[in-house]
Image: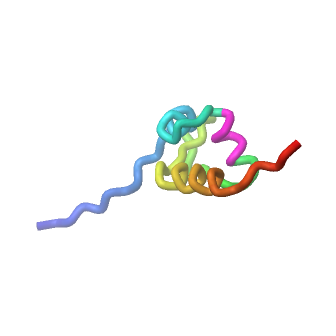
Amino acid sequence: MLKTLSLPALIPGPLAAEEAGVAPATIRKWVQLGHLRAAGKAGRAQLFRLEDVFAAERAARRKPRASV
């Protein structure tokens, strides 16, 4: 019996934001800040691995926000 490799699913930014419970702008900000990297592209849309999105979300929760 052959084993099939399952590649991680890539999802677009808006769906990644929905899964992480954040706004799409937050996903874009994490990319700008270097907390998240796109794993691919579909046309102009950036695609992300869900596990990378959750890792970025956990990292963002750990960091205290700067008071203004």
Q: What's the residue at 60%, 53% (across, down)? A: 56
Residue 51 x/y as whole percent: 47, 54
Is residue 57 positioned above or below 12 on the image? below
**Residue farthest to the left?**
1
- Left or right for 27, reference 14: right
**Front residue of 21 and 35:** 21
Is residue 3 positioned above or below 11 on the image? below
Q: What's the residue at 88%, 42% (across, down)? A: 68
Is residue 2 positioned above or below 7 on the image? below
Residue 62 x/y as whole percent: 64, 57
Residue 30 x/y as whole percent: 68, 47
Q: In which quarter of the image is residue 29?
A: top right
Visible residue check, residue 25: yes
Whether residue 12 appears in magenta in the rendering, the answer is no
Residue 59 x/y as whole percent: 62, 57
Secondary structure mostly seen in the magenta stretch:
helix
**Residue farthest to the right?**
68
The coloring applied to the image is rainbow
Visible residue check, residue 12: no
The quadrant the N terminus occupies is: bottom left
Range covered by the magenta-colored residues = 25-30
Q: What's the residue at 57%, 54% (across, down)? A: 58
**Front residue of 41 and 36:** 36
**Residue farthest to the front?**
67
- Left or right for 25, reference 13: right
Q: What's the residue at 82%, 49% (across, down)? A: 66
